[in-house]
Amino acid sequence: MEAFQFLDNIGKGSFAKVYKVLRKADQKVFVAKEMEYGRMSEKEKQQLVNEVNILRELKHPNIIKYYDRIVDKQTQKLYIIMEYCEGGDLAQFLKKLKKDKEYLPEESVWKIFSQIVQALCEIHRRQNKILHRDIKPANIFLDKTVKLGDFGLARMLNINSEFAHTQVGTPYYMSPELIEEHKYNEKSDIWACGCLLYEMCSLQPPFQAQNYLSLAMKIKSAQYDNIPQQYTSEMKRVISWCLSVNQDQRPSVDDLLNLPRISIRLREKR
Ligand SMILES: CNC(=O)c1c(C)[nH]c(/C=C2\C(=O)Nc3ccc(Cl)cc32)c1C
């Protein structure tokens, strides 16, 4: 990593440390996601190769850009060099709003959501369909546009990925089918989008509990409190639609793109 100067440790990605770094050659700022592969199992190493292969293929304004990967054989560390987003992640942003007792204006919720739906459209529509599998505020980054990042748990649909992957943190966005240990599929990403939409309105996830069992019960029955009354019935409807326990009843990415509050934005972009 001689080509880079480490500036700050700015957080943790999935199974990794995240640094703000400066490329010495042109003084440009990037993020380096550092992973120690020396202690990884063969499966985890394959998962790492998989993340890099996914990232390098994706080029979209609403997906974190991949620039390079650097292997340091001496320290047995892999660095993934990605774009830096000055605004940080959405989780911190929502946490500050909650602390300041402020809600996100509905217009801002739709603006963020429409960009994540466009990112999802990009990864789901590909020939080798990609599932993000970890959509949550901590994996959404704020810059001139909103960007979906940290594909640490992502999978190409054609790769038979066992259900059990080491879950880091509480699985607030886990879907009913995942609790039943059915295969993760694109509708599981849609469930996570429903949780994201809910959390942007309520500043907390739809499903919370003191332990995994009661969390699982709430998720399986889609039992959640109403969002604050200042949000429209359309917002409530879309959240309820994404949080359909039966995945066949959930919207597709195209259904979400065709929502009036999202399609109007896409027309304005053209
Ligand atoms: C306090 N946090 C920050 O200031 C912050 C900022 C300004 N950027 C980030 C994080 C990322 C960032 O800016 N780009 C990223 C690409 C991939 C991953 Cl896993 C993380 C990031 C963070 C955590």
Image (cartoon, grey):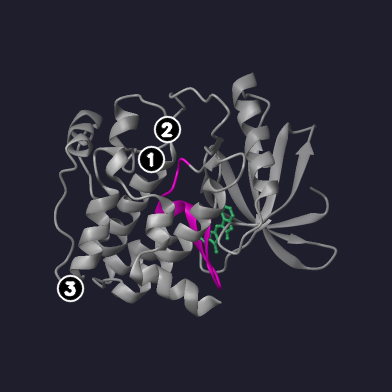
Report, in whole angstroms, how far the alpha carbon at label 3 lies from the one at label 1: 28 Å
Residue identifier under label 3:
230
Q: Quadrant of residue 175?
A: top left
Labels 3 and 2 touching (C-beta < 8 A): no
Amino acid type, callout 2: Tyr
Residue 174 percent across, percent down from the top left: 33, 38
Q: Nearer the viewer, residue 138 or 238?
A: 238
Q: Residue at x 62, y 62 (%)?
A: 84
Mark 1 element type: helix
Quarter of the rendering occupied by the C terminus? bottom right
Report, in whole angstroms, how far the alpha carbon at label 2 lies from the one at label 1: 6 Å
Q: Quadrant of ligand 1?
A: bottom right
Q: Residue at x 60, y 26 (%)?
A: 44
Q: Is residue 13 visible?
A: yes
Report, in whole angstroms, how far the alpha carbon at label 3 lies from the one at label 2: 34 Å
Q: Residue at x 75, y 67 (%)?
A: 28
Residue identifier under label 1:
188
Labels 2 and 1 touching (C-beta < 8 A): yes
Labels 3 and 1 touching (C-beta < 8 A): no
Q: Quadrant of residue 91?
A: bottom left
Q: Which region of the structure is painted magenta?
A: 133-148
Q: Residue at x 64, y 42 (%)?
A: 54
Residue identifier under label 2:
184
Mark 3 element type: loop
Query: Comparing marks 3 and 2, which lies closer to the viewer?
Result: 2
Query: Comparing marks 3 and 1, which lies closer to the viewer?
Result: 1
Quick check: 62 above or below 250?
Answer: below
